[in-house]
Amino acid sequence: MTGVTTAAAEPAEPQPDAPTEAGTEAGTAKPRRARGEQTRQLILETALRLFRERGYAETTMRVIAKEAGVAVGNAYYYFDSKEHLIQGFYDRNQAAHHAAAGPILATEKELAPRLRGVLHAGIDVNAPYHSFAATFFKTAAEPTSPLSPFSRESAPAREAAIAIFREVVDGSTAKLDPELRKELPELLWLGWMGVVLFWVYDKSPGQRRTRRLIDGAVPLIDRLVSLSRLRVLRPALRQVLALIETVRKDD
Amino acid sequence: MTGVTTAAAEPAEPQPDAPTEAGTEAGTAKPRRARGEQTRQLILETALRLFRERGYAETTMRVIAKEAGVAVGNAYYYFDSKEHLIQGFYDRNQAAHHAAAGPILATEKELAPRLRGVLHAGIDVNAPYHSFAATFFKTAAEPTSPLSPFSRESAPAREAAIAIFREVVDGSTAKLDPELRKELPELLWLGWMGVVLFWVYDKSPGQRRTRRLIDGAVPLIDRLVSLSRLRVLRPALRQVLALIETVRKDD
DNA sequence: GTCTATAGCAAGATAGAC
DNA sequence: GTCTATCTTGCTATAGAC
């Protein structure tokens, strides 16, 4: 899933570049901010747990605060709104996806397995949250929401996600048309968004249809990318690239 | 665009629950239910008007009731929730799209202009509602919502929409692989969903980027459909069809 | 800077009287 | 069928303790 870099509700943020990965066992330094960070984490953890247990809509801010042992106002001190709690989820899973993709990208050299590995890793990371992802998905789907994967506010997270796919392409041995190579990472990210959309709607046990979609689509993409170098298909490829260019204007 | 003025906003015929009484009913025009139907219509019309004027989220049930001259509880008597009011809008535009597509489908015989006409007609019909479509789009995007285009409840409307694209294909002179011909209507409908998604997010003046997307994508689809008969591409086509088959299972 | 407690508003939704 | 009264919940505001 794409995330959204928040920066919105941060109390005092000098340079919090430290990724919010699980291993934030920074030393005993900065005693002043430590307490706040701890409370923030506590609220977020509690909220995510409750979301997973009872669903997003069914989890009230009152209950989150109560379970976390803080006052409602305190939850709002750290998170501007209930939706902002979702951003925490986004950021975390974005980082987790990147981490999970690491080993594959370091090992595999061919395009297809690289892509396949990254896509499955993305689903792996999100799998535990499938049931409640569906309930809050609509929040992210609203075009005007900063949580939308296409919004200006989520540009940094989006770029980070696209970067993963750029790594997929650039680190592979695949021979590509130069222009296609340039566009492919963003196209693959778009495809990933499609997979996520499919996954959200996927009600099959363990979301196995999504797994099958990935396993079937990756060789297809691989084949199409190879075919794109055929002479008969050059015009079609140019047409695709031209379409992208045309549509992108007027952002 | 394609000269099809839509008369979009006008309620072609809001047929809610035509009870299809088995002729035996007295000819007294069912006085008992008439009043209820009238109230129902009044509430719906008022709601849609306010949605267009002020947006979905900004229109409260209290205001709808007040403007319609009824009590809040009465509105809930007829519509289970605020979201259920959207269903009326949905049905109406579906019918308008079909009507707007009629002339094109009766005139054009080649695949590309048929498809292009139908897509532009769809955008024409929805254009007046773009600003508020974005605000309530999220409700339709929720997978668990009956308003989702993929939900069981919207199956009839979905089938009706797919039927339009079946007409696009079947009424065209295009020569197609039989299997592809069978799948194409649903694929085109999926593509249409993609166009709608793009349109909802399209903030360019008059949503001209969406128009360009259509104008660029249609010839491309046309070309790919033609190319699919090339011998080099047969395996790829088979692969695409196999993927669809695989993914469709487990519905 | 962090946190509590509490009061209150707006709006979606419901209960029960008539 | 229709109403009024009420509940719920996201969210705000304030005043003050450490």
Image (tube, coloured by chain):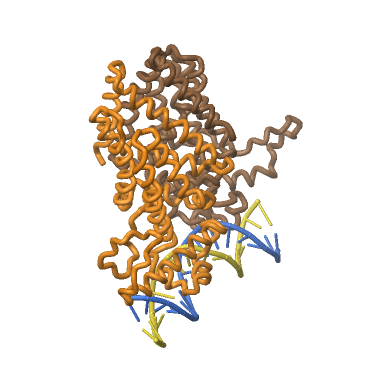
Chain colours: A orange, B brown, C blue, D yellow
Q: Nearer the viewer, residue B243 or A110?
A: A110
Whether residue B7 is visible, yes or no, is no
Residue B178 percent location from the top left of the image: 50, 15
Name the residue rendered at 38%, 43% in the picture: A104
In the displayed image of the protein, which residue is found farthest to the front? A107
Residue A62 percent location from the top left of the image: 51, 69
Numbered label tally = 0
Name the residue rendered at 42%, 73% in the picture: A74
Q: Nearer the viewer, residue A94 or A150?
A: A94
Tell me where residue B204 sits by quadrant.
top left
Residue B132 percent location from the top left of the image: 40, 46
Whether residue B211 is visible, yes or no, is yes
Quick check: A39 above or below A84? below
In the displayed image of the protein, which residue is found farthest to the right? B24
Quick check: B157 above or below B106? below
**A142 sits left or right of B154 in the view:** left
Name the residue rendered at 63%, 38% in the picture: B17
Q: Nearer the viewer, residue A151 or A187?
A: A187
Q: Nearer the viewer, residue B13 or A76?
A: A76
**A149 sits left or right of B177 in the view:** left
Name the residue rendered at 28%, 28% in the picture: A175
Residue B68 percent location from the top left of the image: 52, 52
